[in-house]
Image: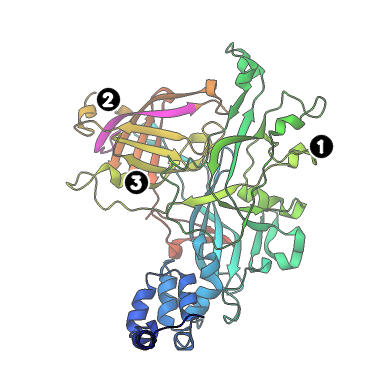
Amino acid sequence: MVIHDESEQTERTHIARTACHITRLPYELVLELATYLSADDIVSLLSTCKVLRTHYRDETIWRRLCARYGVTDRSIFGTYPWFTIYSTLLHTYGALLGLWASDQPFKGNVMEYRLGIDQRGHPSIIGEVWKFRDSINIDVDDNDLEEPSLPTYTQSFVIPLIGDGTRAFNKPRPRDFIFHVHDENAPWRENSTSTYGVNAPSFRYLSSNFQSTGIHLRPFQHRRTNRSDDASYALHPDFPDYDDDPWFDKERELLRLKQQPSALSPDSRVYLTNGNFPSSVPYLYTVRTDHENPPAFSIFPHPAPMWHDFLHLHDPPHGIVDLRGLTAMNPRDPLNSGVPARYYPLRGPKTSPHRLGEVDWTYADLEGIWLGAYGSHGTEVLYVNYDEEENEVRAVKVTGDQNVPRGVHSWSFRVGRSGGDEDMDVLDTSAFGNIDVKEIHRGAGTVSAPGFMPNARSRTRATVALVNEDDIRIDWVYLRSVSRFRRYKGRDLDSEIVVKPGVRQATRWL
C-alpha cells in the first residue's frame, strides 16, 4: 500500500480540476485545430466525449475536408449535406480524383477520375479512359506537320453516391462500383458487380512489388548484328522510375482501401518447355528485379467474352503475346495469361504563369502535360519538366507505342548560356516554314525499331522550336518529319460533345 501525503493529494486534485481540457476551449479554436488534423483524427477527436460529439455533423468540418479534394461546390450533389458527401464518398474514394497512368507495356494508358452525374442521375465519381484519334497531317508552307488530337473520354465505371449517410465511414462494398461496357456493335450498357458477382471486373489496391517486364523478340531479328542470342531478351523500361519520373505525383494521398498483396510470378520463361510454345514468337515475360514499384490500383476484368471490350479499354492490344501471368498452374493458356495494368498517380495539367519571352519566364514554365503527334502511332501523352541542375528540358512519355514505349525520354534539349538565341542563326529552320518561332534549340530524340531492344534504339538529332509557352515543334532531322506538341491544360466539360452515352469528345484547346 502506498500512503500519499494529504497536502500532495489535495494539490493533485486542484490541478485536475483547473486543468485546461479541450472542451473548455472556444469551439472556434477547436475548429481551427481541426484544420491540421487528418479526417481519421478528427473523427477520433469528436468521439472522445459527449460535448464534442454534439458537433459531429457540423457542416463546417466536413466542408473543409471536402475542400481537401478540391470539392468546394456541392451543386451536383443536390440536397446531400457535406457530411454525407465526405463520409460516404470522398473519405474512401476521394484520392482517386485526378489523373492516373498505367504501366501497360509499350502503349500505357491514362485514366481520369472526376465528379459528375452518372447515367441514372446520381452524383458520382466517374472514371474515364483517355483515347485518341489518329494524328492529323496538314500542309504548312509545303511541309507536312503532324498535329496532335484532343482526348476522347470513355467511361469505364462510376462510383455513385447513394444513401443518406447511414453507411458513413463503412468499408467499401463491391456494388459501390458500376462498370461500363462499350461495344462498337452493341448499345452502351452498365453492369454492377452485384449483378454479375464473381463474373464482373474487380477494383483492387495492390501493394508494392519488385517485378518488371521482359521482352523476347525473334532471334533472327538480331543475328544480323552479330550479337549473341541473349540480345533477343531485354528488360522493358521501368514505369514508374520513382526517383526519376517527374510525372509521378508523390504528394497524392494514398487510397483508403485495404492493400492486397501483389501476385509475384517467377520468370515465366521457365514454363515454356519444348513443344509448348515456339521460341520464334515475340512475347513478354515476368522477371524479378531490385526496382520497387509503388502501391497502385488495378482493374481485373473477368475473361468472359462480355468483358473483352472492357479489357481492351484498359489494356490496348500491343501485338505481342503476353506471358506474364503464366504459372505452373496455367501452363497451357499463354494467349490469355497477361497481368492487368497497374495505375499510378499522374500530376495534373499546369498552365504557364508567364508568356514565353517575358522577363519572368523560365524553362520551368514548360512543365506539365503535353500531347504530341507521333505519325502512324497517333497522339501520345508526355510530361515535360526542366532539370535546373542539368539545365535541360526533357519530355518523358506517359503513353507510348511499339517503337518507343511509355517511360522513355522522347526528346530533350540543353539550354545554352544565351537561351535559344545562339542556335537561331546556325540551325536549319526551314522545316518549320514561316511560323514565328521564339527560340530554337539543338536537341536529341529517341528512335527505335519495334520492340525497343538495346541494339535497335538510338538517340538522334532533333531541332526544338519553341513557338510559345503552349506550342513546341520538333524537327526529327533524319526522319524528315516535324511533330507538334501542345500543352494540355485540362477540360471544358461544357464544350465537349457527347458522342454516345458514356463517351465524350473534347472539341477545343484551352
31, above or below 250, in the image = below
Residue type at tag 3: Glu
In percent of width and height, residue 77 lies at 50, 77
Q: Is residue 151 magenta?
A: no
The residue wearing badge 3 is 367
Q: CA distance from mark 2 to mark 1?
A: 57 Å
The quadrant in which residue 317 appears is: top right
Q: Report whether 58 appears left or right of 283.
A: left
Q: Are marks 2 and 1 in contact (CB under 8 Å)?
A: no
Q: Earlier in the sequence, mark 2 or mark 1?
A: 1
Q: Is residue 435 magenta?
A: yes
Front residue of 183/454: it is 454
The residue wearing badge 2 is 427
Q: Report whether 475 appears left or right of 180.
A: left
The quadrant in which residue 510 appears is: bottom left
Report the predominant secondary structure element of the magenta stretch: strand
Q: Nearer the viewer, mark 2 or mark 1?
A: 1
The range drawn in magenta is 433-447
The residue wearing badge 1 is 332
Residue type at tag 1: Arg
Q: Earlier in the sequence, mark 3 or mark 2?
A: 3
Residue type at tag 2: Leu
Q: Nearer the viewer, mark 3 or mark 1?
A: 1
